[in-house]
């Protein structure tokens, strides 16, 4: 029980980190291209994670698990990051935020279908209620925003959501055999190696050289917190409390992003965002019981 409470607390921290990271990445995109932001953050983050693994644990992994870890990295790092970034290019952030957060819905059903865990009725209700909270928070009560934007962007956001759901689900059998740090490090490294293919096309050293000191500080904090710490805590929670219960905390990310925007950027909080936030946290509470 104590371990469960610690996992819930750590997942709330992950939600806060990833919510604040949305604001941080939004700031970086005023000075850097999406390609530069993706490559610098994840390639550097994977190196730091692997160094941490090297000093804390045995780095050996059976050959039969290497391809699974590579698939995990491709799904959750390489594919997801490009789908998410280009979805934002073609459609609104509201549409992306809503569609991305569908992953707990089918992620929970898929984990039950694959036999990883039983999908209780109470958890189904919690997931649906949580998504309703995200919808209210993101749309501010105006459902018509879903019909705005390019259909390409909406399709990319849905595919990104599926990619993240599969990324979390595919980690479960690996976490039954390996530590969260090892799974996080190897999957991140594999995803970053695949990202390396895009370096000649997307990396712009001149753009990075023009980045301000504040920009570099934001990048460093983004790498340390949103990649090294948050990804490790996410995987540890999957190993300890299961897939469905972990994934529902993804709903807290938009609420954390709204709060971060209010405190950092001075953006006004709408009453619908407050209502949506309350519903989201109520769904998380329901999923824990």
Image: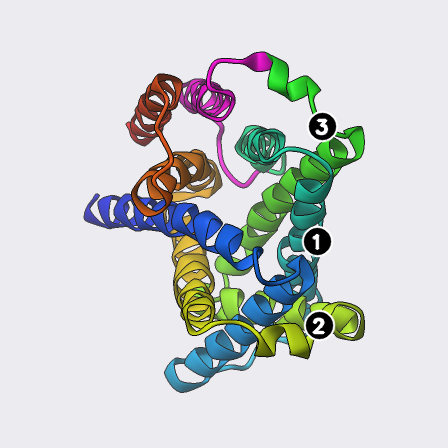
Q: Residue 247: where, in percent of width, then height?
A: 47, 39
Taking the image as drawn, is residue 65 in sight?
Answer: no
The answer to if 15 sits in the magenta stretch is no
Say few, some or many: other residues with alpha carbon within 10 Å of mark 2 (under 14 / 14 to 19 / 20 or more): some
Residue ID for mark 2: 203
Residue 140 on the magenta segment:
yes
- Mark 1 or mark 2, whichever is nearer to me: 2
Q: CA distance from mark 2 to mark 3?
A: 28 Å
* Mark 2–mark 3 CB contact (< 8 Å): no
Q: Which quadrant of the view contains residue 235?
A: bottom left
Give how far apart the Cα atoms at labels 1 and 2 are: 14 Å
Observer able to see residue 257: yes
Q: Which mark is residue 149?
A: 3
- Region in magenta: 115-143
**Which element type, helix, strand or loop, lies under badge 3?**
loop
Query: For the C terminus, which image quadrant?
Result: top left
Q: Residue at x 38, y 36 (%)?
A: 267
């Amino acid at each position: 029980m104590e371990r469960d409470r610690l996992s819930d607390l750590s997942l709330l921290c992950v939600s806060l980190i990833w919510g604040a990271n949305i604001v941080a990445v939004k700031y970086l995109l005023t000075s850097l291209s999406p390609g530069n932001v993706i490559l610098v953050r994840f390639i550097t983050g994977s190196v730091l994670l692997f160094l941490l693994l090297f000093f804390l644990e045995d780095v050996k992994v059976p050959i039969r698990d290497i391809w699974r870890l590579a698939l995990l990295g491709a799904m959750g790092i390489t594919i997801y990051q490009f789908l998410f970034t280009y979805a934002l290019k073609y459609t609104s952030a509201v549409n992306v935020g809503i569609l991305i957060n569908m992953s707990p819905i089918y992620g929970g059903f898929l984990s039950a279908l694959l036999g990883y865990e039983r999908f209780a009725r109470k958890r189904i209700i919690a997931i649906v209620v949580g998504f309703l909270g995200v919808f209210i928070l993101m749309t501010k009560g105006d459902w018509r925003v879903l019909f705005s934007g390019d259909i390409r962007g909406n399709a990319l956001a849905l595919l990104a959501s599926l990619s993240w759901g599969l990324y979390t689900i595919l980690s479960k059998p690996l976490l039954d055999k390996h530590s969260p740090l090892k799974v996080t490090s190897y999957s991140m490294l594999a995803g970053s190696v695949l990202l390396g293919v895009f370096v000649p096309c997307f990396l712009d050293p001149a753009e990075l050289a023009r980045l301000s000191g504040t920009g570099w500080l934001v990048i460093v904090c983004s790498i340390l917190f949103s990649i090294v710490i948050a990804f490790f805590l996410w995987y540890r929670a999957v190993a300890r409390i299961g897939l469905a219960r972990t994934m529902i905390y993804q709903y807290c990310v938009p609420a954390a992003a709204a709060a971060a925007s209010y405190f950092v950027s001075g953006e006004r909080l709408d009453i619908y965002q407050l209502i949506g936030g309350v519903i989201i946290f109520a769904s998380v509470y329901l999923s824990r019981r």
